[in-house]
Image: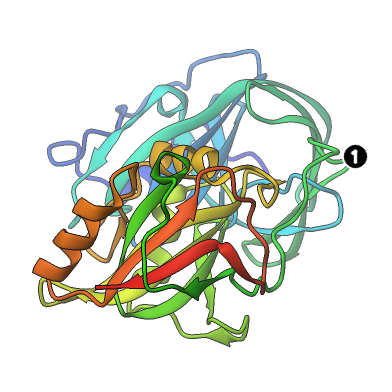
Amino acid sequence: MSPKKNDDRLTEYRGRRDAGRTPEPVPGEGPLPRGDDDTFVVQEHHASSLHWDLRFERDGVLVSWAVPKGLPWSPETNHLAVHTEDHPLEYATFEGEIPKDEYGGGKVIIWDRGTYETEKWDDREVKVVVHGSRVSGRYVLFRTRGDDWMIHRMDPPADPDAEPLPESLPPMRPVRRSRLPRDRDGWAFEFAWGGRRLLAYVEGGRARFTDGTGRAVDGPARAGTRLGAELGARPAVLDGELAVVEGRETYLICDVPHLDGRPLLDVPYRQRRERLDALGLSGALWQTAPWFPGDGGAVRDAAAAQGLPGVLAKRLDSPYRPGEESDAWRFVPV
């Protein structure tokens, strides 16, 4: 990673891009601009595989690494960082859609940007202090082999109260009842889809799954990476059901027991559902399942009309109790 002559720092970058086809900045040859070597940017890159691009202004270019799982928030975990070609300084403000048949095709979003200070910079180790709106602190990148580096957070966790995702979480289960609750104002109602219960653990742009017993299983085909890309850098545990809807296998998400480093087990059902709805999870392979406070009778009639097995009645104030069968959740057949 030794500095090259100014006239060839961007040769590799230009060689991989067609200025007539990509919206990315492709500056012509010539002297590089002079900056203050203090700008950094992290871009969320929805290419063939979701990753985050970490870039530091250095000697007239943006020295760049692709970080598949994003920057580590705690010193307990190191993340892979793959050194890539230098980018032009103009790339620090780039957002847009790179055509799919072009190098790096996919959406690019600025995830964070700010300033940084250099403590050490050589061919094998880069030590910096970053000051962004979403990430701040001391980080070190160290080379392992070839273009493979690792990135390590040197400071204490960015959020000391954040908790990692659980390794496994057995889902809360409903009891079976023949009638809907009488106090319907205290309940919400969902469709029972008759599918397979799955919990998704989404982190670093990827998802893994467990079944109704908490055992690791394969998830819906192709859904793991795509669902991870939908949430980006937000870690979450999602509770749902894999069922066939309109002829297509779909992961129907109905709860979020853990989000953004916070367990939501003691948060009432109504608030968990509102937080889940705010995530806007909707794709070809997954959907946020609807919920209907109040009128369970109409939901039950609609379930019967669709040939579904029944409805789930859930108390609006109910916590999430992993592995428990609770009367706060009730399955009522049609």
Report helix, strand or loop for mark 1: loop
Where residue 266 appears, x then y in whole percent?
70, 47
Q: Is residue 301 above or below residue 37?
A: below
Identify which residue is drawn at 35% across, 53% down.
189
Q: Which quarter of the figure has residue 221? A: bottom left
Q: 222 left or right of 4?
A: left
In this rendering, position of residue 280 left or right of residue 37: left
| Residue located at (66% from left, 72% from top) | 324
Amino acid carrying mark 1 in the image: Pro
Residue 5 visible to the viewer:
no
Relative to 164, residue 244 above or below: below
**Which is nearer the eye, 167 or 275?**
275
Which of the pair 244/218 is nearer the observer? 244
Q: Depth check: 284 or 35 in front?
A: 284
Total labels drawn: 1
> Residue 23 placed where, x, y %?
22, 33
In x, y percent, where is residue 238? 51, 60
Judge the density around disc 1: few (<14), some (14-19), many (≥20) Cα neighbours within 10 Å. Answer: few
Q: Residue at x 62, y 62 (%)?
A: 147
The residue carrying mark 1 is: 156
On the rendered image, what quadrant is the C terminus found in? Answer: bottom left
Q: Is residue 89 visible?
A: yes
Picture coordinates of residue 43, whole percent (x, y): 48, 37
